[in-house]
Image: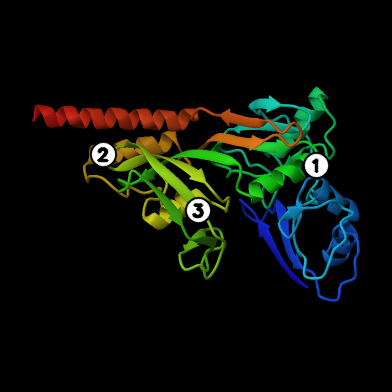
């Protein structure tokens, strides 16, 4: 038997779901697949396996199977399962959440920058999940199994925009499969340093933790470390010294957009962790330096916004699509750049 267990995550030290690839041994006798997997996968309940089967997340030779399927020698089994809630006690806190959609299975939030998504090291309170627990307790709209919802993806603390949370484990299991299959539509907008050469393109290269600084993700172009990552982009507006781009993700690696554009030599505007918080392009004039510093004060974070999110509803099967306007700080910085470029063109004309 071979078991290739891979963990897919889109934020630091927090796994969302696990993926197992298993090839059944030649001498294996026929046995129900839920019983077989219960004996092969560490720290999993038989009910968890059955839920994965019910959600269509257990494939044998490429086809989904039910819990009572009898495994055969040389069967190739692929399993995607959500992780159980972490062993971190979460208390309800009255935190403002911009909820744009909610039903019995899912909740979609337009997250403000500066809000941590889930408790973790140095952030055991004041997170979005603390706010969700308060929301569920206050509204009593539905019964949430763990009191605060089930994560299916996340965005960084200082990234604004759309995030999806499941309200029960079955919804989480089905949505996790969509993220694993890269069938979820996600579009972001970003401001990056420099004049990006191509109007559109694709950035590839495995992403993994830097061998020098584990807080930073690095692109390994030869794939010797990390996991495959694919980002598509197109230019929305050029400002000479920075570029406004749209990004669409095939994969969901930690800091993917931030790492990919840094790798291209175009780190995100004011992204301190990836070197974007200095004046990387432009003139030496004091007026220009002051302009950049004023922009940094308006948006004291990486200039990244999760604009759109599309997925199949885990219960109804309907296509769900959500859009989010740019956060006010990013919108204001873009307006300042519009004004700056216009004034330079007028100066050039007058000269």
Whether residue 301 sits left or right of residue 3 in the image: it is: left
Tag shown at residue 298: none
Front position in the image: 324 or 288? 324
**Residue drawn where x is 85% and y is 31% of the image:** 143
Whether residue 286 sits left or right of residue 12 in the image: it is: left
Q: What colour scheme does the image use?
A: rainbow
Whether residue 64 sits left or right of residue 320 in the image: it is: right
**What's the distance in space between the residues labelled 3 and 2, CA to CA?**
35 Å
Front position in the image: 346 or 227? 227
Nearer to us of marks 3 and 2 is 3
Is residue 321 visible in this depiction of the protein? yes
Q: Picture coordinates of residue 18 (x, y %)?
A: 72, 57
Above or below residue 289? Residue 67 is below
**Residue drawn where x is 38% and y is 55% of the image:** 264
**Residue drawn where x is 83% and y is 40% of the image:** 146
Sequence-first disc among 3 and 1: 1
Mark 3, residues whose alpha carbon is within 10 Å: few (<14), some, or many (≥20)? Answer: many
Q: Picture coordinates of residue 55 (x, y %)?
A: 79, 45
Q: Quadrant of the C terminus?
A: top left
**Residue drawn where x is 24% and y is 28% of the image:** 342
Mark 2, residues whose alpha carbon is within 10 Å: few (<14), some, or many (≥20)? Answer: some
Q: Residue under label 2, please give it.
A: 288
Sequence-first disc among 3 and 2: 3
Above or below residue 97? Residue 158 is below
Q: Residue under label 1, please give it.
A: 170
Tag shown at residue 230: 3
Q: In which quarter of the view is residue 68 placed?
A: bottom right
Above or below residue 70? Residue 190 is above
């Amino acid at each position: 038997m071979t078991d290739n267990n891979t963990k897919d995550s889109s934020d630091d030290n927090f796994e969302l779901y696990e993926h197992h690839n298993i090839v059944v041994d030649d001498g294996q006798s026929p046995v129900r697949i839920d019983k077989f997997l219960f004996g092969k996968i560490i720290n999993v309940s038989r009910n968890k396996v059955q839920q994965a089967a019910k959600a269509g997340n257990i494939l044998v030779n490429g086809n989904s199977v039910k819990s009572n399927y009898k495994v055969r020698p040389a069967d190739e089994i692929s399993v995607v399962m959500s992780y159980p809630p972490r062993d971190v006690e979460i208390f309800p806190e009255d935190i403002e959440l911009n909820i744009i959609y909610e039903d019995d299975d899912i909740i979609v939030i337009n997250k403000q920058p500066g809000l941590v998504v889930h408790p973790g090291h140095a952030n055991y309170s004041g997170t979005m999940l603390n706010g969700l627990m308060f929301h569920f307790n206050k509204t009593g709209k539905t019964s949430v199994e763990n009191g605060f919802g089930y994560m299916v993806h996340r965005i960084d603390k200082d990234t604004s925009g759309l995030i999806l949370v499941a309200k029960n484990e079955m919804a989480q299991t089905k949505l996790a499969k969509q993220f694993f299959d890269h069938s979820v539509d996600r579009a972001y907008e970003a401001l990056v340093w420099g004049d990006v050469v191509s109007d559109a393109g694709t950035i590839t290269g495995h992403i993994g933790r830097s061998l020098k600084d584990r807080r930073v993700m690095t692109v390994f172009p030869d794939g010797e470390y990390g996991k495959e990552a694919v980002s598509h982009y197109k230019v929305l507006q050029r400002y000479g010294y920075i570029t406004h781009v749209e990004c669409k993700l095939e994969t969901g690696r930690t800091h993917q957009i931030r790492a990919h554009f840094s790798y291209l030599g175009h780190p995100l505007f004011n992204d301190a962790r990836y070197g974007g918080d200095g004046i990387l392009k432009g003139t030496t004039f004091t007026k220009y330096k002051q302009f950049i510093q004023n922009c940094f004060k308006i948006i004291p974070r990486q200039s990244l916004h999760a604009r759109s999110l599309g997925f199949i509803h885990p219960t109804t099967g309907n296509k769900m699509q959500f859009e989010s306007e740019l956060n006010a700080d990013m919108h204001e910085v873009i307006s300042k750049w519009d004004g700056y470029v216009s004034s330079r063109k007028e100066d050039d004309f007058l000269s």
